[in-house]
């Protein structure tokens, strides 16, 4: 069995961060979201992985490489434009061949992984297995109608939802999905929709099953979603101190201080992670915060946030909370002192606080 991970798309909901970076490489708990997806695939026993890439292909290739760090073989499939998930599947047919495969959207996060679903699909004879989750907002996504565990109908963003079973961005297919992708027409968005391809399989009488997941699933398409995944991952963190902790510093809870990081006269309360070569000086880092590598935080307070590499935060007068701060950002204090900030700053930003 093979895996196909999608890492294209324009990521408009995460701008300005994604103006200069692939959304799948934004780190949660100091690891790119895409790496979490690859680890899910590896844990399911799959060693042949295709990654569909778009305009950020060079960045994705540089980060992932040939897959050897995970013990897998990676093949890149280039999609010239974001023409839909079914289009991405169709252009990947030369890689997939006649094998069964899992389709995994690279910006999705599933806490419990996919191993049990992959094993069920490999052991069964169904043509497709679609993962579903109960959602509070079914009118905002594709939903499924079931008879037992069989899918009988899919509806995209229905005004009157026929169920609360939302379609998770993780699917398993056999070779019949390629015939379906060739048969359907582009939607009003000029995209080949995967829901239309699945409905084609259903209409042709093929065996399309569903499983409702029990673990936490998050689509990391927005700032609050990224912070949510960050909290979920950090909650399982195990304490590890490899960098230096000096002066009157206090480290409490499950905190990771990576190699060559420095904590000087600061308080860090876990769960939190401080990346390699980062410096925390006379500052407070609160729970559920991920500080990536080569970050400097001085005389400031931050919690429940993600800070990307090569960023400086100095003399922040109020506590920074629920923020996603990009690469090479300079965050400086001016004169007046507001009590708190909630931010999403893109790469190379400079902020002077009033």
Image (tube, rainbow, N blue to C red):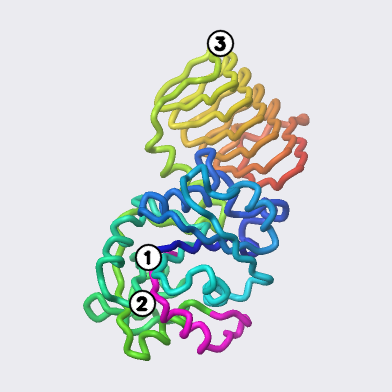
**In what element is the residue under mark 1?**
loop
The residue at 58%/74% (across/down) is 91
Label number found at residue 246: 3
The residue at 44%/48% (across/down) is 39
Q: Is residue 118 left or right of residue 35?
A: left
Check disc 1 and report the residue beneath it.
Answer: 135
Q: Quadrant of residue 58?
A: bottom right
113 or 90: nearer the viewer: 90
Check disc 2 and report the residue beneath it.
Answer: 144
Label 1, label 2: how many angstroms apart (C-alpha)?
Answer: 12 Å
Query: Which residues make up the magenta segment?
Result: 169-192
Q: Is residue 190 left or right of residue 71?
A: right
Q: Residues within 10 Å of mark 1 (few under 14, many from 20)?
A: some
Q: Is residue 17 magenta?
A: no
Q: Is residue 189 magenta?
A: yes
Q: Quadrant of residue 348?
A: top right
**In what element is the residue under mark 3?**
strand
Callout in the foreground (1, 3): 3
**In what element is the residue under mark 2?**
strand
């Amino acid at each position: 069995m093979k895996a196909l991970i999608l890492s294209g798309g324009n990521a408009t909901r995460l701008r300005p961060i994604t103006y200069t970076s692939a959304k799948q490489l934004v780190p949660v708990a100091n690891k790119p979201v895409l790496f979490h997806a690859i680890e899910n695939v590896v844990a399911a026993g799959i060693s042949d992985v295709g990654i569909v890439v778009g305009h950020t292909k060079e960045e994705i290739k540089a980060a992932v490489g040939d897959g050897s760090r995970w013990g897998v073989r990676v093949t890149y499939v280039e999609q010239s434009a974001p023409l839909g998930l079914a289009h991405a599947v169709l252009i990947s047919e030369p890689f997939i061949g006649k094998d069964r495969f899992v389709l995994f959207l690279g910006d999705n996060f599933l806490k419990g992984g996919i191993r049990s679903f992959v094993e069920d699909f490999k052991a069964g004879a169904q043509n497709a297995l679609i993962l579903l989750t109960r959602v509070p907002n079914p009118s905002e996504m594709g939903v499924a109608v079931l008879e037992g565990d069989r899918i009988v109908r899919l509806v995209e963003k229905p005004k009157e939802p026929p169920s609360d079973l939302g379609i998770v961005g993780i699917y398993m297919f056999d070779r019949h999905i390629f015939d379906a992708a060739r048969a359907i027409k582009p939607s009003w968005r000029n995209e080949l929709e995967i829901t239309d391809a699945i409905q084609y399989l259903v209409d042709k009488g093929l065996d399309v099953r569903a499983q409702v997941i029990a673990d936490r699933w998050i689509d990391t398409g927005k700032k609050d979603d990224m912070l949510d995944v960050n909290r979920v991952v950090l909650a399982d963190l195990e304490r590890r101190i490899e960098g230096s902790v000096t002066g009157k510093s206090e480290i409490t809870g499950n905190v990771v201080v990576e190699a060559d990081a420095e904590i000087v006269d600061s308080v860090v309360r876990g769960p939190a992670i401080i990346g390699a070569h980062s410096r925390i000086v006379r500052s407070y880092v609160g729970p559920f915060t991920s500080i990536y590598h080569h970050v400097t935080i001085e005389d400031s307070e931050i919690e429940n946030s993600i800070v990307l590499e090569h960023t400086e935060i100095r003399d922040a007068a109020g506590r920074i909370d629920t923020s996603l701060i990009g690469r090479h950002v300079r965050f400086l204090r001016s004169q007046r002192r507001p009590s708190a900030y909630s931010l999403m700053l893109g790469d190379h930003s400079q902020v002077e606080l009033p």
